[in-house]
Image: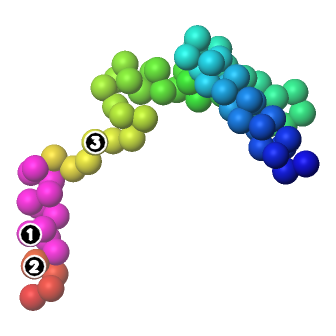
Amino acid sequence: MKFRLAWVLLKALDLVNTFKEKGVGLKSLQDPINTTRAQAGLSAATARDRTDGWLKGLSKTAQEKSLTAEWVSLR
């Protein structure tokens, strides 16, 4: 029974990856799962030169100001 469940799960994941490669999103009819919105968000983030929608971090100047402020507050 465990082998059959594992095999079915692997086949399902393989199918999902095939769909993803072809640009097809999945939407569950019973659960709040919708990969099409996530894919659209990632595409928009990439267009704005952001990796996965996250900011790239502090600029060098901001890092220096932060370290200076931390050092002053420790004195």
The residue to which callout 3 is attached is 56
Which labelled disc corresponds to residue 68?
Answer: 1
**For the point 10% across and 78% down, which residue is it?**
71
Q: Which residue type carries mark 1? A: Thr
Which labelled disc corresponds to residue 22?
Answer: none
**For the point 8% across and 60% down, which residue is it?**
64
Q: CA distance from mark 3 to mark 2?
A: 26 Å
- Range drawn in magenta: 60-70
Q: Is residue 51 above or below residue 23?
A: below
Which labelled disc corresponds to residue 72?
Answer: 2
Left or right, residue 21 beside residue 15: left
Query: Which residue is nearer to you in this view: 2 or 52?
Result: 2
- Badge count: 3
**In the image, is residue 9 part of the stretch drawn in magenta?**
no
Task: Kindly check if marks 3 and 1 are in contact, taking CB atoms under 8 A apart as contact.
Answer: no
Q: Which residue type carries mark 3? A: Lys
Q: Nearer the viewer, mark 3 or mark 1?
A: 3
